[in-house]
Image (cartoon, grey):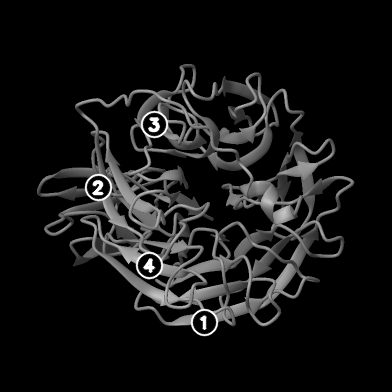
């Protein structure tokens, strides 16, 4: 099977069932892709911008049929910012991220000068610049988005290419200077399909879908390129890991697309010391299968989606508390869209996502929101910095804010707009939550801000 299709080849099982919906939950279709405005939202999740809108990519459709970058407001107004033309990339499979400079950064799976994919920068107004075109020797087929590290550079993975043809890990500066940090070898690890994450110590963690015995790995890599395998999956504890997050308790959490006791994928926990515990084995049509990844919301619980299974066999949205079992929040239907990407929680507390298929006349997918009663919060851009570093705080209804604190230490600030506060890390600040006092109440950051020394 083609390397690229190993990730995409998830069998969709159709079955009959009922939809479980709580009165406190509201599922809303915000927009429907029509082909001309994009089609097939792939693996990634949406990224929230400074004005409260969300940005994403579609793998197909648009003016040239090669995919798009789009913006959508929380109320559902969708705008195509850019249509790829193959020369600048094609088939963007992953999320865009908001850089500290206010631009969006992303990747394409194909196209570019050599046909092996690109890394691009795009302004919020839609002006796109190709930062790098892969040529196979430095990587090819990018299914994962980027992460911007504390040093300002971006890190990412390619699913194939490199010295051995089995994928790479790379670093690229905002100016476009690319360095290959690691080339995967099928005798050990291969095919990284998911984004990297950076932990407070500076190391980066990620996953591969292959590697002996071909069920995937979890690895750690230093910013300089020294790689260590943390865990090898053996199918009984999962197969084909679909990404990692580091939770507020310091442990890592993630999912596998396949494997586990029911062969439908798993949820796992990994300690920083490398001990992996399978927390849940999905059961297919009962509660979903092929989970796509997790987010931790501001209530401390985890939320995720399944590609398959559930009441209609078309996937689910679920909530998970460690020590419990997933609670199915929503079962996707044909009209809702199905084969969902990951979720993101907006600073309004609502969950947002999009689907690859279903919905509308062309079955090109939908953008949706799910309100589960979670309250608003604030997030910082970036999430770490030294004393004196300029920080943007994103939120909702920030007009009239009277106080900003970093770990309890007051900071000088300016309310730039109803959704953005400009500030700087105050002297004496320690790692901890950022709090913003507004006329309607105090908003707390969803994750602690990390003060660097």
Residue 176 visible somewhere in the drawing? no
Q: Quadrant of residue 425?
A: bottom left
Where residue 149 appears, x then y in whole percent?
57, 60
Mark closer to the observer (2, 3):
2
Q: Which mark is residue 129?
A: 1
Label 2 sits on a secondary structure element that is loop
Label 4 vs label 2, nearer the camera: 4
The disc placed on residue 300 is 3
Residue 306 lies, in percent from the top left, at 49, 36
Q: Is mark 3 on a helix, strand or loop?
A: loop
Nearer to us of marks 1 and 2 is 1
| Residue 294 located left or right of residue 260 | left
Residue under numbered circle 2: 348
Residue closest to the eye, 363 or 286 = 363
In the image, 197: left or right of 433? right
Badge 4 or badge 3: first in the primary sequence: 4
Mark 2 packing: few (<14 Cα in 10 Å), some, or many (20+)? some
């Amino acid at each position: 099977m083609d390397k690229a299709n190993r990730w995409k080849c998830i069998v969709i099982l159709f079955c009959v069932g009922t939809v479980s919906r709580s009165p406190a939950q509201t599922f809303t279709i915000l927009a429907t892709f029509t082909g001309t405005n994009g089609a097939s939202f792939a693996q990634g999740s949406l990224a929230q911008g400074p004005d409260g809108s969300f940005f994403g990519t579609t793998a197909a459709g648009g003016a040239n049929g090669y995919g798009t970058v789009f913006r959508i407001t929380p109320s559902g107004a969708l705008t195509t910012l850019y249509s790829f033309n193959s020369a600048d990339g094609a088939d963007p499979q992953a999320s865009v991220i908001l850089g500290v400079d206010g631009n969006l950064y992303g990747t394409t799976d194909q196209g570019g000068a050599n046909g092996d994919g690109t890394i691009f920068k795009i302004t919020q107004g839609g002006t796109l610049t190709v930062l790098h075109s892969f040529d196979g020797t430095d990587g090819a087929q990018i299914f994962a988005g980027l992460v911007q590290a504390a040093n300002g550079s971006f890190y990412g993975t390619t699913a194939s290419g490199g010295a051995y043809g089995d994928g790479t890990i790379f670093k690229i500066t905002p100016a476009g200077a690319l360095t290959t940090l690691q080339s995967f070898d099928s005798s050990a690890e291969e095919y990284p399909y998911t984004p990297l994450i950076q932990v407070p110590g500076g190391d980066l963690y990620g996953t591969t879908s292959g590697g002996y015995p071909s069920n995937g790995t979890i690895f750690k890599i230093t910013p300089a390129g020294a790689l260590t395998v943390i865990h090898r999956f053996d199918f009984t504890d999962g197969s084909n890991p679909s990404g990692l997050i580091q939770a507020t308790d310091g442990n890592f959490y993630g999912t596998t697309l396949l494997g586990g006791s029911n062969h439908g994928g798993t949820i796992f926990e990994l300690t920083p010391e490398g001990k992996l515990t399978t927390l849940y084995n999905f059961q297919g049509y009962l509660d979903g299968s092929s989970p796509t990844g997790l987010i931790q919301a501001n209530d401390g619980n985890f939320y995720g989606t399944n590609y398959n299974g559930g009441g209609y066999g078309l996937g689910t949205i679920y909530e998970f508390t460690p020590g419990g079992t997933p609670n199915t929040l929503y079962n996707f239907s044909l009209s809702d869209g199905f084969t969902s990407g990951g979720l993101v929680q907006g600073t309004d507390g609502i969950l947002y996502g999009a689907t690859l298929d279903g919905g509308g006349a062309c079955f090109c997918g939908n953008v949706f929101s799910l309100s589960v009663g979670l309250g608003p919060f604030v997030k910082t851009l970036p999430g770490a910095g030294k004393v004196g570093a300029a920080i943007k705080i994103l939120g909702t209804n920030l007009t009239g804010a009277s106080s900003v604190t970093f770990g309890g230490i007051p900071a000088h600030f300016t309310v730039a707009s109803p959704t953005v506060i400009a500030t700087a890390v105050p002297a004496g600040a320690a790692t901890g939550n950022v709090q913003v006092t507004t006329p309607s109440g105090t908003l707390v950051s969803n994750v602690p801000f990390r003060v660097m020394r």
